[in-house]
């Protein structure tokens, strides 16, 4: 009997447990459902939709080479999968388990209608499987990481199925272009096209590149001018490659660079374990005392709205913040150290709610991951279960100099490309600010004092 393989963020043939197990049962139909209803306010943003289009196109080509097809449907996932199952005479659906709160609800509803087989395929270890000595779930990264490392190695990689048996008759499929996932009016994706290759084959090319550079990761990962980060995050997010594959590619390494990078893979697992415990982590302060925090609201405060727009456009007068925000808009991605600096600036220099930043990153990042995005924003804001203290306020100007960001700034803030160090880190202070580059929208010292005063209001409330 025909099996359905329901794909979401697992757009690959190799090491895909759902595809692997379905292929062993007989004919299969691989289907992707574009469901903008179930996620509600976390439906895919513009950058994610751009990546999704190209990843689906790449996967469809890979399936075709195996004599199979990718079926596309749009609408409520439960309704569309139930309808498709009736069309092809299937009663069984294979999927890789997803942990976003809306997918957990959808998986529950689908299991009431069809024989749903959920597999674990997107993390080093199945979320929920790493437990404390008393059987509870970890809420802090460091002990979680220690416990997970003690369980390594992860499972073996699964090969690409030798054959994908076709059904007796193929069901109808939407045309990918009809989904209008790509921007046209205007087409703002030129920088994304120049920066990225999309798809499973591209992910493995990047993995091979990373094999030659991973040992520099510990020393160079915080330096945005150096190309010493993997840039595998969107490939991992969309499941064009699995963390299992990345781990096995480096399992024989013993250097500090790999150990540090392995910690980043573990952080992905930790973030997902966090949202399993706290599904609303992207929309609610974990530390409830921050519900009293006096955020400046761009919806009601015109000065806050102007500051938010300056941050979004990379026009704050702080070169490293502006370089990061312009890199984000141009490429759909931002260097991780700069993500922290830019996020801290929005939260602590501008006193704008971290959830505003979470939503902006959700719309503009090609690797916008519900768990990681929320966990990272709450970490910076000091509102999370495992987070930096709010009172630790990043100084973007000294961070820029400390991590040698001059070349990075020149690449994304052309108004400053002629400046030498140290002026490029703080043109205004050195009397070198070009007329086309803005003054600081808030002085660092005044911003710090304002943030700490706001924190006192929370503690005394």
Image (cartoon, rainbow, N blue to C red):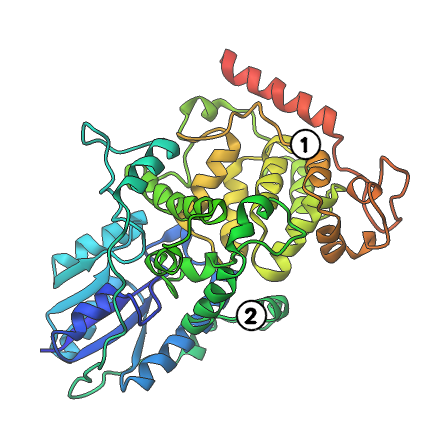
Q: Closer to the observer: label 1 or label 2?
A: 1
The answer to whether 209 appears left or right of 12 in the picture is right
The answer to whether 206 appears left or right of 322 in the picture is left
Q: Specify the quadrant of the image occupied by residue 61.
A: bottom left
Q: Foreground residue, 40 or 415?
A: 415
Residue located 46% across and 53% down the image? 368
How far apart, in angstroms, are the residues tagged by discs 1 and 2? 36 Å
Q: Residues within 10 Å of mark 2 (few under 14, many from 20)?
A: some
Residue located 18% across and 75% down the image? 23
For residue 395, the mark is 1
- Residue lying farthest top? 460
Residue located 70% across and 37% down the image? 402
Residue located 56% across and 51% down the image? 216
Image quarter (top left, top right, bottom left or bottom right) of the N terminus: bottom left
Residue 285: percent from left, percent from top:
43, 31
Residue 428: percent from left, percent from top:
85, 38
Residue 148 showing in the rendered view: yes
Residue 343: percent from left, percent from top:
58, 40
Q: Specify the quadrant of the image occupied by residue 18.
A: bottom left
Residue 3: percent from left, percent from top:
15, 73
Which residue has dot 2 on it? 183
Residue 49 showing in the rendered view: no
| SS state under label 1 | loop
């Amino acid at each position: 009997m025909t099996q359905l393989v329901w794909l979401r963020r697992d757009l690959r043939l190799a090491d895909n447990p759902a595809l692997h197990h379905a292929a062993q049962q007989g004919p299969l139909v691989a289907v992707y459902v574009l469901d903008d209803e179930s996620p509600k306010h976390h439906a895919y943003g513009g950058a994610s939709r751009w990546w999704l289009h190209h990843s689906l196109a790449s996967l469809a080509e890979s399936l075709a080479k195996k004599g199979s097809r990718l079926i596309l449907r749009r609408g409520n996932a439960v309704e569309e999968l139930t309808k498709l199952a009736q069309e092809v005479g299937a009663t069984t659906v294979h999927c890789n388990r997803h942990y976003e709160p809306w997918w957990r609800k959808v998986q529950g509803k689908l299991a009431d209608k069809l024989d749903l087989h959920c597999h674990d395929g997107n993390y080093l270890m199945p979320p929920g499987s790493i437990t404390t000595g008393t059987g509870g779930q970890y809420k802090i990264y460091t002990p979680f990481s220690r416990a997970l490392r003690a369980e390594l190695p992860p499972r073996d990689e699964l090969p690409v199925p030798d054959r994908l048996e076709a059904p007796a008759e193929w069901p109808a499929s939407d045309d990918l272009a009809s989904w209008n996932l790509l921007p046209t009016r205007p087409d703002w994706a030129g920088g994304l096209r120049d920066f990225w290759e999309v798809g499973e084959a591209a992910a493995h090319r990047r993995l091979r590149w990373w094999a030659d550079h991973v040992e520099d990761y510990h020393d160079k990962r915080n330096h945005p001018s150096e190309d010493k980060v993997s840039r595998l995050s969107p490939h991992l997010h969309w499941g064009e490659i699995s963390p299992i594959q990345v781990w096995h590619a480096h399992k024989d390494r013993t250097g500090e660079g790999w150990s540090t990078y392995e910690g980043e893979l573990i952080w992905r697992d930790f973030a997902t374990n966090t949202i399993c415990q706290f599904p609303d982590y992207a929309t609610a302060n974990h530390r409830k005392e921050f519900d009293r925090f006096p955020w400046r609201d761009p919806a009601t405060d015109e000065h806050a709205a102007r500051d938010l727009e300056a941050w979004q456009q990379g026009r704050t007068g702080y070169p490293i913040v502006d370089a990061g925000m312009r890199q984000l808009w141009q490429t759909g991605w931002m260097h991780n150290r700069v993500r922290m600096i830019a996020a801290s600036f929005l939260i602590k220099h501008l006193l704008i709610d971290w959830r505003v930043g979470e939503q902006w990153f959700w719309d503009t990042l090609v690797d916008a991951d519900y768990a990681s995005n929320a966990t990272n924003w709450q970490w910076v804001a000091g509102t999370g279960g495992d987070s930096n203290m709010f009172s630790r306020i990043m100084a973007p100007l000294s961070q820029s100099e400390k991590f040698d960001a001059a070349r990075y700034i020149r690449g994304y803030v052309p108004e400053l490309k002629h400046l030498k160090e140290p002026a490029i880190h703080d043109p205004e202070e050195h009397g070198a600010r070009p007329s086309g580059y803005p003054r600081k929208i808030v002085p660092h010292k005044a911003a710090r004092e304002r943030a700490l005063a706001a924190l006192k209001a929370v503690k005394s409330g």
